[in-house]
Image (tube, coloured by chain):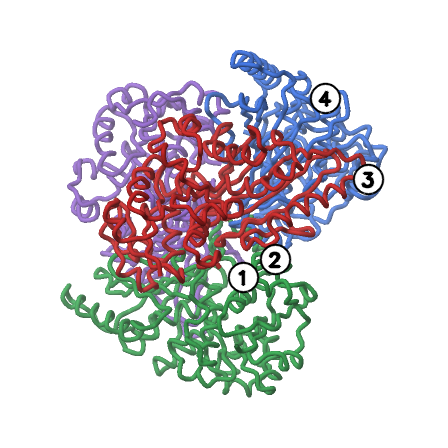
Chain colours: A green, B blue, C purple, D red
Amino acid sequence: MKKAAIVGASGYSGEELVRLLLNHPHVELVAVTSRQSAGQTVAQVFPKFASHPKSRTLRFTEPNAELLAKQAEIVFLALPHGVAAEFAVPLTQAGCIVIDLSADFRLKSAEVYKEFYVHDHPAPELLKKSVYGLPEVYRKQIKDALLVASPGCYPTSILLPTLPLLRAKLINPNSIIADSLSGVSGAGRKAEADYLFCECNESVRPYGVPKHRHLSEIEEQLSFAAGANVTIQFTPHLIPVNRGILTTLYLAPTEHFADGAAAAAFGEKITACYQGAYATEPFIRLLDGKALPDTKNVVGTNVVEIAWRLDPRTGRLIVMSAEDNIVKGASGQAVQSMNIVCGFPETAGLV
Amino acid sequence: MKKAAIVGASGYSGEELVRLLLNHPHVELVAVTSRQSAGQTVAQVFPKFASHPKSRTLRFTEPNAELLAKQAEIVFLALPHGVAAEFAVPLTQAGCIVIDLSADFRLKSAEVYKEFYVHDHPAPELLKKSVYGLPEVYRKQIKDALLVASPGCYPTSILLPTLPLLRAKLINPNSIIADSLSGVSGAGRKAEADYLFCECNESVRPYGVPKHRHLSEIEEQLSFAAGANVTIQFTPHLIPVNRGILTTLYLAPTEHFADGAAAAAFGEKITACYQGAYATEPFIRLLDGKALPDTKNVVGTNVVEIAWRLDPRTGRLIVMSAEDNIVKGASGQAVQSMNIVCGFPETAGLV
Amino acid sequence: MKKAAIVGASGYSGEELVRLLLNHPHVELVAVTSRQSAGQTVAQVFPKFASHPKSRTLRFTEPNAELLAKQAEIVFLALPHGVAAEFAVPLTQAGCIVIDLSADFRLKSAEVYKEFYVHDHPAPELLKKSVYGLPEVYRKQIKDALLVASPGCYPTSILLPTLPLLRAKLINPNSIIADSLSGVSGAGRKAEADYLFCECNESVRPYGVPKHRHLSEIEEQLSFAAGANVTIQFTPHLIPVNRGILTTLYLAPTEHFADGAAAAAFGEKITACYQGAYATEPFIRLLDGKALPDTKNVVGTNVVEIAWRLDPRTGRLIVMSAEDNIVKGASGQAVQSMNIVCGFPETAGLV
Amino acid sequence: MKKAAIVGASGYSGEELVRLLLNHPHVELVAVTSRQSAGQTVAQVFPKFASHPKSRTLRFTEPNAELLAKQAEIVFLALPHGVAAEFAVPLTQAGCIVIDLSADFRLKSAEVYKEFYVHDHPAPELLKKSVYGLPEVYRKQIKDALLVASPGCYPTSILLPTLPLLRAKLINPNSIIADSLSGVSGAGRKAEADYLFCECNESVRPYGVPKHRHLSEIEEQLSFAAGANVTIQFTPHLIPVNRGILTTLYLAPTEHFADGAAAAAFGEKITACYQGAYATEPFIRLLDGKALPDTKNVVGTNVVEIAWRLDPRTGRLIVMSAEDNIVKGASGQAVQSMNIVCGFPETAGLV
């Protein structure tokens, strides 16, 4: 049993980490911090976990990096960007494994960070050491990482379906359009009027058009896969569900198919590409037949559903993905990375 | 055309008043105030009203009683309790008709006010002059009122079905149990974590058990009708809909019926009682046959649906009502009272 | 007062037509038909309309074209495709003005109809006489029409934002990608398991990928505007709201802008284009500043909200629209056409 | 590993049984039946379970009692009342343990069954052998049962909070009023217009007033506990959430308390009563402090939350409970009973 702590455990990602770690077979949750909840037990802050005996004894504390480094071998940071770095620096120096769910260490370029987050990177020297925590891509590097930068929810839903196609050169890198629909938990547990029930219920709306911050990590990863700078189009929308991201991708194949036979042949390449990349991945479900992704089939799980269609009328490739933004898009993926770092079975505590 | 103003127009009741008054055939909306929205047009604050020409010229201002008294003949107060009185005093002194949607002038007793609202009444001398704005009961008094205290949303849903039965002595006054289910707009447009989408969606919960503030005005009105002090049981619940209150009332008939014939005879008395009270009321819909109230049939309207059932197994009378908490439970009823005070057709601007 | 009838009045579009026509200042609703509801009053089938006196006397009947032709001057058909034509033929022959909400007369080409609807067109000779009921485009032709083919909900949300740009040659016709999000009422009031509450709530999903039937009328209209055959990409998604369509369009401008100044100049052309097309349209709201469309701002109204953004990073133009799929996307637009045909003010009964 | 089968596995309770049994540590799911899904794999019918390897090999079959008796040691019946008995008879005769989720064997009286279900009981001789599957009450009897009649969702939410009070004679048996709010899954996966998304969303409504079928088993169990015939008041309401029942109970204490001290003393008796009954129960969570039940804290779990308040103003006791209607109200409780019958740890597969 490894000892783990969660810093910033009162938000939606933090709450999900609490759930996953309370039930993890190889981890003991030894500390949870939250300025606003300090002093209360986990059961008091999250009544839904009150049936777990530990929830009635474990109390939230004020965050304190020095203390955490003594208590825990693994520390999850579920903090706003900018703040996460303040903990990552001392904790990694003290030898803790840090799994950071913020955006602070996802980019390799401190300049791009500044462009998108509008302040200097707080710890640029750590950018080289951090590993982007997308296990399906960086499993090997995660294994030896001391600092894992767990990907954003939108990036996960966009990168997993596109990276294999880009690496196989089946799509034009600069054709990518990603249209994403997110549940309201993506906005966090912030008391802002925009996210009140009556403002979101019976409402569908785009936001952050055209330059959302997640573009920075999406494009950096796509560029690595394409071996060239990639710029994409991305539009997020807010949808009245608690959880789930549905992403629809519009892609230009690198081949033009004159007839049905050519299209079918290209379709087989796509199938082979996805099968090669993901057939044995425990958390990627490639849909076949007439099935299309539906967030209700993945909510509460660490699974991403992916389906694709070639459109013979337009020559475009449509790829759709569904994930739980708080699990595979945040806390579940973070635990998956921890499992890899610690040598646990990768699915431990996630099924 | 009478000139009207709304003080506190940026909340849900205020917004609904804006909608109703922008489209009212006999009223010109001349001023809307809100500290947080001052300087913006109605169209900017409420994009949904932007197609109304006036919305693009009318700007929110800081509230100022002196100025309002010069601009408007009728002033609606959509303010928190305690604050409303600060405007009601100077405005009524200046000769304005004041329609107050807060709890400040609903009670006749300043002592009961203090018991339930935990501060001294800010203007006890005005309590005698105010009229409780339930038109189906106080139409005559509203006609001559300078200060109308528009009822709360729960009280409206409870009083309309019970008052005729009490006055006809068909039910035992101290038997009343009211179980109410309210949409989230009832909590107002407050940026509090409890009312975030993800905290309310997929959640059903009671609150304020057992002593909700609305009990004070409910019991005062019931006591007037019964001619004796009435104490009731009331449990509000929060339900994930934007609007609507569904109230189920458990009542003890004053007669016990030994058999079906006796029950049928008593049922005829109830029918006669409701018909006598409400058959010609434009905003009360007595359901017949198998129909039961459903909030979706009243949302967006000033109508209250009422149905009842006698239970031969228990001898109890079950009465159910449905209303839109923001219309008949707040702003629509306030406009209905204004129509009466001003001598407009009572349904003007409400259908 | 003109006499109007609704055939197929028990579905969602039919219900909304009932609402609009019961309250229309220049129309008397004289007949509503529905096989399943025949014999019941409007108030019984739609309790929410029960406060309208007419709802308690007007009864649903079995549909009978001959009888309808005697009763009504205007007949709305809210029927499935294929069935609508069976009524349109005799009713137009009898001299009635027919406003058809089905897909039967929206296309000029019977071949395209067969390709998309998989059966021969039931009355190809009427295709020449029908007018596509998009008032902002065909107002003049609607004026003299005897048969108006009211557009589909998705086509309305896609055509209104794109047609002016196409006509002004500001976008590449074959670049159009339309990503649409629809409320569940778009599926109609059909008792199918896919549309049960528990199957739609907490679910977000694409469907009909890549060849939805509405493509036929969208592409025909786009082709007319472009003066050449246009093929587009279209992906509909089902979202857990009752009403509303949010469409996000990805478009390639015909100009490439090397710098911010060039982009700003092109932006001014777009503004001028939309202003020229829609500045005086009563039901189109061009958003400015930071505002983006939100279905909650248009639900219950006949308004379409439109906003656009040029993305300097990708060179693309993003246009977003929001409408109520049952009002501007169906019944409201049908009433708007009726107003034009009958010489009523175009906004009569719609605000 | 015991072999288990589910008859009628395509409804909501059946689906939840599939989920629970696929993941149960001591059970192998060997057969699932459904007329409409016969031939398809579990993964095809329920894509959300597709990551479980077994879901891709296990196929739905037509239900056949003889065959099931050979395949499985334990058979769950998730069938409509009346139909369940057709399988229970041959399966129990063949020596299978039958856990029936229908109403067929919940009553001891065939006459009461006929009164409430309006047909003769199909297998009255089995009524004597069946055990009411409420483990917190009948754990000992369930241990030796061959036929467990798993309780209804409303009965579970009403009986668990009331039975200890009745047995301790703390409440008047004939005072009980139960007001229940249920998510839409309670209506089953039936393609009926009443349960379409647009008919339930933004709607709150009572139904089945005043004589719901579940009254029969509720009153039979209450009568056993009270040692006398008990008749109660029960009103179910439909609420737009997928899952969850919130029940508010209005009860008359057997003691009247003249002052606060007397009330406090009585409150201690209630606390002691609940603690005595449930302190060690793994699936009952007695709330303390200011906490009130909320369905979102129990959805997806087998837990019932219970809180109570004495109202000094009325002398009444208000008790509130929350459960997941499909888990503790159906499939989870059925698995809990199976665990007891089979000698597994009672919480196996349920946490």
Look at label 4 and name its amino acid. Ala
Could you tell me which residue is drawn at 46 percent across and 26 percent down? Answer: C25
Residue where numbered disc 4 is placed? B225
Q: In which chain is the residue bearing label 1?
A: A
Residue where numbered disc 1 is placed? A187
Residue C275: give x, y in percent of width and height.
45, 52
Q: In which chain is the residue bearing label 2?
A: A
Q: CA distance from mark 4 to mark 2?
A: 43 Å
Label 2 close to label 1 by CB (< 8 Å): yes
Q: CA distance from mark 3 to mark 4?
A: 23 Å
Q: Nearer the viewer, mark 1 or mark 4?
A: 4
Residue where numbered disc 2 is placed? A192
Look at label 1 and name its amino acid. Ala
Q: CA distance from mark 2 to mark 3?
A: 32 Å
Q: CA distance from mark 3 to mark 1?
A: 40 Å
Q: CA distance from mark 1 to mark 4?
A: 49 Å
Look at label 2 and name its amino acid. Glu
The answer to whether any part of residue C34 appears in the image is yes
Quick check: B263 left or right of D260?
A: left
